Image: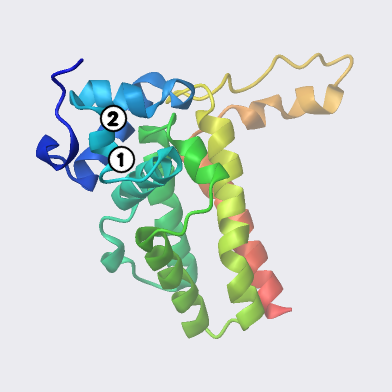
Amino acid sequence: MANRTRGTSAGLDRGQIAAAAVALVDRDGLDQFSVRRLADDLGVDPMSIYHHIKGKAALLDAVSEAVLAEATAHADDLSGDWPAVARQIAHRYRDMAYRHPRVFPLLATRAQLSPVALTTLDQLVAAMRRSGLPDQSVADAPAVLFGFLNGHLLARTGAGAGGPSPVPDFDAATHPTLAALAPRFADFGSTAEFDRMLDTVLAGLGDRAVR
């Protein structure tokens, strides 16, 4: 398309490009994402995008930052003791993952070092230090918490917003214990299941700090 707008005359900014990129991934998935397809959606020449964001890797980082900004839009209202702060962060992160299941693998597989990500982590570790937890436990906490969140949410959103099929039909003859526990898996993907597992993670962090 020879008449596409180029460079600064395209009237774009980084935020507009990131928002359009999020919408494109939400619609078509990461496998189909490219700068050229994004340029098509925006009606501009690809060089107009590169003027603001230098390369596809930087663009994917901008996509991650945009959805994280949704999850941390009200980060200044985090309150309570450190488990309460951790729960608030975890639930906002979960909500974002369910809104953007096709974007979420970026957050789980790429280092998140944007200002919005680091600000939220700083609030979490600050709450833990205020509670008197040892520095090593505090330093380990983000990796433990987000290791759980990323693995759990990838499994729950892996087939889109509805997630994968929850519970297989276990054969009681070959897998008797799994079959007996099958009713316990009935709330797969629910908020109740998430809270139950999150409680286990937070209790583990607390117990380790005490020891």
**Which of 57/134 is in front?**
57
Determine whether the residue tagged by mark 2 lies in a helix, strand or loop.
helix
Which one is in front, 194 or 4?
A: 4
Residue 188 seen from this side: no
Q: In the image, which disc is placed on residue 50?
A: 1
51 horizontally vs 79: left or right: left
Quadrant of res 207: bottom right
Q: Position of residue 70 (x, y in %)?
A: 29, 48
Residue at horizontal 14 percent and vertical 28 percent from the top: 5
Determine whether the residue tagged by mark 1 lies in a helix, strand or loop: helix
User: What scheme was used to colour the molecule?
Assistant: rainbow
What is the three-letter code of the residue carrying label 2? Answer: Pro
Residue that label 2 marks: 46
What is the three-letter code of the residue carrying label 1?
Tyr
Q: Could you tell me if the residues under marks 2 and 1 are in contact, i.e. CB atoms within 8 Å?
A: yes
Please state the horizontal and vertical placement of residue 153, each as a whole percent of the image.
53, 38
Above or below, 68 relative to 186: below
The one nearer the camera, 66 or 203, is 66
Side (left or right) of 88 relative to 1: right
Quarter that holds the C terminus: bottom right
Residue 91 visible in rendering: yes
